[in-house]
Image (tube, rainbow, N blue to C red):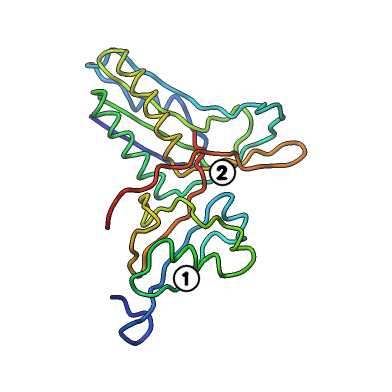
Amino acid sequence: MPRHRSGYLAGMQIRMLLFALYGDLAGVREVEVDVSPGSTARDAVQRLRGLGPAFARLPAEPAVAINQEYAGLDTGLSGGDEVALIPPVAGG
Amino acid sequence: MSVEALITADPIEPRRVLASVGSPDDGAVVLFLGIVRRRNEGREVTRMRYDAYEAMALRVLRELAGEAATTYGATHVITVHRTGDLAVGDVSLAVAVSTPHRADAFAACQWLIDELKQRLPVWKKEHYVDGERWIEGTAPPPGEVAR
């Protein structure tokens, strides 16, 4: 278990990425959140949405990618994971 | 078999894309170009901005190109997606496929574009004379990877 802070139950640092519409809503494209060990992607999204009124505009159940792979919201996280909120895609 | 994928902020050059495919074993080469068009849903587009989760988009593009090559027996597959600010007429996407017979080249190209529309973490914002908006996209399939 990563120890960004001292103690056995140190929180996990998760790097959250916001693209396109979600980046515009939140006003930033990248933010670190601290979640407790055993947290899921859903927990990290919830923590992110609690950071302020702009973040609260983000959807509660966005599509996510963990470390560049699509994943379910109930996937468990590890410290240092990169969680991207993926708006509906429109490539091509 | 060769598979190439590229995400780039530089203009896409179709000639260079074409030069990446084809061999003496191939009887067919299909090149697809996606172009920024002037009108969308009745509004006049002045420019288009493409945003990408670049590292992941590159990974997805590579996977799709590899799968297309394997499924359709293509000898070469190349996909290039542009990012940044594009003008009307600019190429946003290029896909080229070479295969021994034409049906496979058409099918591989079609499949690849259909799939990347569903999965590629890329977004576009249309700019109009009187405003701008993110294009309503497709929700990507939820991940099923248990960790």
Q: Name the quadrant containing residue A77.
A: bottom left
**Residue A52: horizontal and vertical position, in percent?**
61, 69
Please tell me whether mark 2 sits on a helix, a strand or a loop.
strand
| Kind of residue at badge 2 | Gly
**Residue B115: horizontal and vertical position, in percent?**
39, 33
Q: Nearer the viewer, residue A37 or B30?
A: A37
Mark number, residue B73: none
Q: Are marks 1 and 2 on the same chain?
A: no
**Residue B60: horizontal and vertical position, in percent?**
36, 42
Chain bearing tag 2 is: B
Q: Quadrant of the N terminus of chain A?
A: bottom left
Residue drawn at point x = 58 percent, y = 61 percent: A28
View extreme (bottom): residue? A7
Please tell me whether mark 1 sits on a helix, a strand or a loop.
strand
Image position of B35 with respect to B128: above or below: above
Image position of B56 with respect to A13: above or below: above
Q: Label 1: which residue?
A: A33
Q: Nearer the viewer, residue B25 or A57?
A: A57
- Dots 1, 2 in contact, CB < 8 A: no
Residue drawn at point x = 40 percent, y = 50 percent: B55
Residue drawn at point x = 54 percent, y = 59 percent: A29
Q: Residues within 10 Å of mark 2 (few under 14, many from 20)?
A: some
Image position of A26 with respect to A90: above or below: below
Q: Label 2: which residue?
A: B84
Q: Tell whether A5 sits left or right of B42.
A: left
Please state which of the two labelled residues, at mark 1 or mark 2, is closer to the viewer.
1
Chain bearing tag 1 is: A
| Kind of residue at badge 1 | Val
Q: Residues within 10 Å of mark 1 (few under 14, many from 20)?
A: some
**Residue A68: horizontal and vertical position, in percent?**
37, 52
Residue drawn at point x = 56 percent, y = 69 percent: A50
